[in-house]
Amino acid sequence: MDEAALAPGVKHLPKHLRPRWRYLAVGIESWPDTDLDRHAFQRALYDAAQGLLGDAGSAELDASVLSFRFAGGDGEAVVRARRGEVDRLRAVLATVARVDGDPLGVYVRGVSGTVRACEEKYIGGPSEDSAESTVAFAGADRDAVVRGDRVDVDAGGGRVGATALDVRED
């Protein structure tokens, strides 16, 4: 249905009165078996904003996850915020450490004035291949998932994040 048919006589706001946005490309890392979707990440973002900024500050920020991809422990998202609120959104993103009990690493790759520029500059690069392997770590052979120079070692009681320099592959 056409918008004009729903609300006759209603016009769009002039350009100078429309809200202005900034778009942050966000990288996301977790354990390889973490199951994370857009809804859970958006909820964690809302909770972090409300906890850090309160209701009024969270409303001013108006952060929304526009696009989201996450698989095999790596992901990326485009998060929108009002212009002038980028620093506060960065602070909120820094407080997102867990989603549904799974640890999460979140970092900002870059900021743009349009979604298209954000995606072209910072999103969609080649993803790292991951492979299961047995590595020598802490004096024993252990199962691990190797992603580039990152190694997620199964240490019996939980996982340990390491680098390729910390382990020796068999």
Image: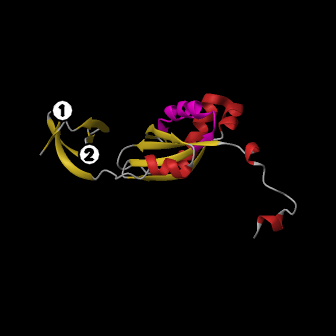
Horizontal side of residue 13 vs 134, given as left or right = right
Q: Which residue is mark 1?
A: 138
Q: Nearer the viewer, residue 130 or 141?
A: 130
Q: Which residue is mark 2?
A: 148
- Please report whichever mark, 2 or 1, sits nearer to the chain's N-terminal start: 1
Residue at image position (61%, 40%) is 81
Q: Describe the colour scheme in one phrase.
A: secondary structure
Numbered marks: total:
2
Looking at the image, is 65 positioned above or below residue 97? below
Horizontal side of residue 49 vs 156, given as left or right = right
**As shown in the figure, which amino acid type bears the numbered disc 1?**
Ala
Question: Which portion, as a residue range, is magenta?
Answer: 80-98
Image position, residue 35 (x, y; %): 44, 51
Q: Nearer the viewer, residue 44 or 92?
A: 92
Horizontal side of residue 147 vs 47, given as left or right = left
Q: Secondary structure at mark 1?
A: loop
Q: Nearer the viewer, residue 130 or 99?
A: 130
Q: Which mark is residue 67?
A: none
Q: Seen from this angle, which residue lies furthest right? A: 9
Image position, residue 139 (x, y; %): 14, 33
Magenta stretch encompasses residue 94: yes
Residue at image position (52%, 35%) is 93
**As shown in the figure, which amino acid type bears the numbered disc 2?**
Gly
10 Å neighbourhood of mark 1: few (<14), some, or many (≥20)? few
Q: Secondary structure at mark 2?
A: loop
Magenta stretch encompasses residue 96: yes
**Residue 85 occupies quadrant:** top right
Residue at image position (17%, 43%) is 135
User: Tags 2 and 1 in contact by the CB under 8 Å rule?
Assistant: no
Q: Seen from this angle, which residue lies furthest left? A: 170
Image position, residue 57 (x, y; %): 68, 31
Quadrant location of the N terminus in the rendered image: bottom right
